[in-house]
């Protein structure tokens, strides 16, 4: 089969950490052709999505004593060609967040891929529907007490009532802009003003979960089913657990409560075409639903001695075969 991956420039990816590389590698290992493109290389011509597609060969990375070893040259590319994306069996939209206007526009361009010929993961419609912070709010019994507001009075009142809270910009990722708020903080008003850009942007304010010190668990869902998880533990000098801010990864299990959360999400995720998703769970509460370019596979593969990439690609193969 032929698979296209819409990614950031390949040379900027980290093969021992980025899930996009894990997926491409798994596709190649399972005998598929892989191509890469970028959002600025998408076009709609006569009602069809075309992309400048670059063929890629990867040198798979290897495990050695609990870590990944990457060769000096881990990929090679050939000349790109402009082709309709319906030449591909599957297209993986894996551009890194934040979700900007160019990102959103790219999803509109992806709407012109013939869905009877090509599977798009995740569906462009789903990517537009699911804001990574807001999507969780519909699962009321899974989330901690949360508000979304740009009104300083409303936010202050919530922080006073909760005595400690976490502020999240709605378009953030990798811990960026995440703030710990408490009523006695002399900077509280200023933090709210900066985060909302003087009341222009709504932000999420969530009850602070002290369990965050034990970890922020990333659970990978494929077609609504949990296939693996990794815990990310804050450094101790930092309340955020994100890997991007130094969070340490640790082996973990998925608890009954977490399976229950996944079961509640599954029908909605599937209906929205969100096939490959990473949820974040702290102390048994759902805090985020990552749909744009969820990561964690390399870490889980290493800790659990599995290949989630191959599992995902096998599912994609089957989905394509059974659909036609
Ligand atoms: N309600 C919460 N209570 C305590 N810590 C939180 C809470 N929500 C998020 N965090 C911390 O902030 C980090 C980032 O939060 P998250 O909502 O996953 O946003 P993102 O990963 O997109 O930046 C998490 O890894 C976690 O350590
Ligand atoms: Mg997160």
Image (cartoon, rainbow, N blue to C red):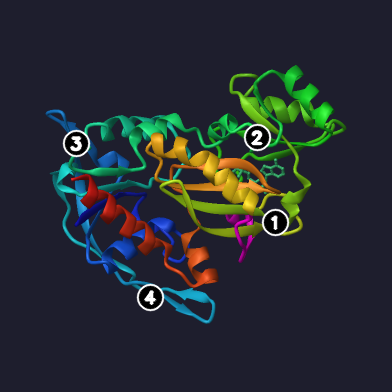
Q: Residues within 10 Å of mark 1 (few under 14, many from 20)?
A: many
In the rendered structure, which disc, 1 or 3, sits on the residue that comes first in sequence?
Answer: 3
Q: Is residue 25 left or right of residue 31?
A: right
Residue 34's disc is none
- Disc 1: residue Cβ within 8 A of ligand 1's nearest atom: yes
Circles 4, 1 touching at the beta carbon (< 8 Å)? no
The relative height of residue 200 versus residue 5 in the rendered view (above or below) is above
Residue 114's disc is 3
Judged from the image, the secondary structure of the residue bearing numbered disc 3 is loop
Residue of label 2: 141
Circles 2, 4 touching at the beta carbon (< 8 Å)? no
Cα separation, mark 3 vs mark 2, equals 37 Å
Camera-side mark, 2 or 4 = 2
The relative height of residue 100 versus residue 235 in the rendered view (above or below) is above
Residue of label 1: 234
Circles 3, 4 touching at the beta carbon (< 8 Å)? no
Judged from the image, the secondary structure of the residue bearing numbered disc 4 is loop
The span shown in magenta is 242-255
Residue of label 4: 71
Camera-side mark, 4 or 1 = 1
In percent of the image, x 62 and y 41: which residue is there? 287
Cα separation, mark 4 vs mark 1, equals 30 Å
Residue 68 position in % (x across, y down): 47, 73
Magenta stretch: includes residue 48: no
């Amino acid at each position: 089969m032929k698979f296209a991956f819409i990614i950031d420039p390949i040379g900027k990816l980290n093969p021992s950490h980025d899930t996009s590389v894990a997926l491409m590698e798994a596709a190649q290992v399972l005998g598929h052709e892989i191509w890469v493109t970028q959002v600025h290389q998408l076009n709609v011509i006569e009602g069809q999505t075309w992309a400048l597609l670059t063929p890629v060969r990867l040198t798979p990375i290897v495990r050695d004593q609990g870590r990944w070893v990457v060769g000096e040259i881990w990929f090679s590319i050939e000349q790109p060609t402009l082709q309709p994306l319906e030449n591909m069996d599957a297209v993986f939209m894996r551009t890194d967040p934040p979700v900007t206007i160019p990102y959103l526009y790219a999803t509109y361009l992806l709407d012109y891929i013939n869905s009877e010929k090509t599977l798009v993961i995740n569906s462009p419609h789903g990517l537009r529907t699911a804001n990574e912070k807001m999507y969780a709010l519909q699962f009321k019994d899974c989330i901690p007490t949360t508000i979304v507001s740009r009104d300083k009075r409303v936010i202050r009142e919530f922080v006073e009532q909760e005595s400690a809270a976490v502020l999240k910009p709605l378009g953030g990722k990798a811990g960026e802009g995440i703030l710990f708020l408490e009523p006695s903080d002399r900077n509280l008003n200023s933090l709210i003003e900066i985060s909302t850009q003087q009341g222009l942007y709504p932000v999420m304010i969530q009850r602070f979960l002290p369990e965050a010190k034990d970890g922020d668990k990333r659970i990978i869902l494929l077609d609504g089913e949990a296939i693996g998880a990794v815990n990310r533990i804050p450094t101790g000098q930092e309340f955020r657990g994100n890997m991007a801010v130094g969070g340490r990864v640790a082996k973990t299990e998925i608890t009954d409560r977490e399976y229950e959360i996944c079961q509640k999400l599954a029908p909605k995720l599937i209906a929205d075409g969100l096939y490959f998703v990473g949820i974040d769970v702290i102390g048994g509460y759902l805090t985020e639903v990552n749909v744009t370019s969820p990561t964690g596979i390399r870490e889980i593969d290493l800790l659990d001695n599995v290949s989630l990439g191959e599992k995902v690609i096998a599912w994609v193969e089957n989905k394509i075969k059974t659909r036609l």
